[in-house]
Amino acid sequence: QVRGSPLTIPAQHCSPSSAPMLRSVAVSLLLVLVLPFLATPVASLTFDVAGAKNRPVSKVITLLKDMLTQLEKEAEEDEEIYDKMACWCTTNDREKTKSIADAGARIEDLTNKIEELTAQSARLNTEIKNHENEVAENQASLDKATALREKQLAEFNAEEKDLLESISALKAAV
């Protein structure tokens, strides 16, 4: 919708590059409306300035000129907005592309770190199992040595008791 007029223009035709096309359409329409009046004989025409301003054709011509001026102004505004949008798109595209590349590199680094830590975890789990087996073997050896020492202590205590009794009997005999 062109501002201030009932003319509807589809959105796909409202780009900065459509201003020359709209200008040519306005000129063509102007020629179509004025050309029939130029084809009439000159003798039958008398020019009335006050009447010419009030004629419907003059009003349409004035309206078309005003529309052309408005369309040129809007085309300039649209071109400025388009330039700003194109600049934003370029800048935004550059930033997003860099951000995506950075995120891709970070994903790759984190994937490598995950693989490294998974391998380290597997190695440490294996070491833990080996140490648990070692602790179990050492505990079994400790239990066996403790039992042997208790048996030897009992034998020593029995032998010591027997020897002390023998010494006591010898002293009593002497």
Image (tube, helix red, strand yellow):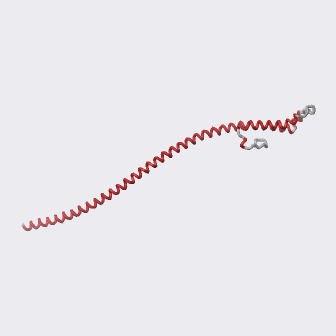
| Residue 6 vs residue 102, the one in the foreground | 102
In the rendered view, would you say 152 is above or below 29?
Answer: below
| Residue 147 vs residue 100, the one in the foreground | 100
| Extreme-front residue of the structure | 39
Q: Position of residue 45 (x, y in %)?
A: 91, 33
Residue at horizontal 32 percent and vertical 59 percent from the top? 136
| Extreme-left residue of the structure | 174
Look at the image and tell me in which quarter the C terminus lies.
bottom left
Look at the image and tell me in which quarter the N terminus lies.
top right
Residue at horizontal 59 percent and vertical 41 percent from the top? 93
In the displayed structure image, the side of residue 122 where residue 34 appears, left or right? right
| Extreme-top residue of the structure | 43
In the displayed structure image, the side of residue 126 where residue 159 appears, left or right? left
Name which quarter of the figure residue 3 lies in: top right
Residue at horizontal 81 percent and vertical 38 percent from the top? 29
Residue at horizontal 93 percent and vertical 33 percent from the top? 44
| Residue 13 vs residue 153, the one in the foreground | 13
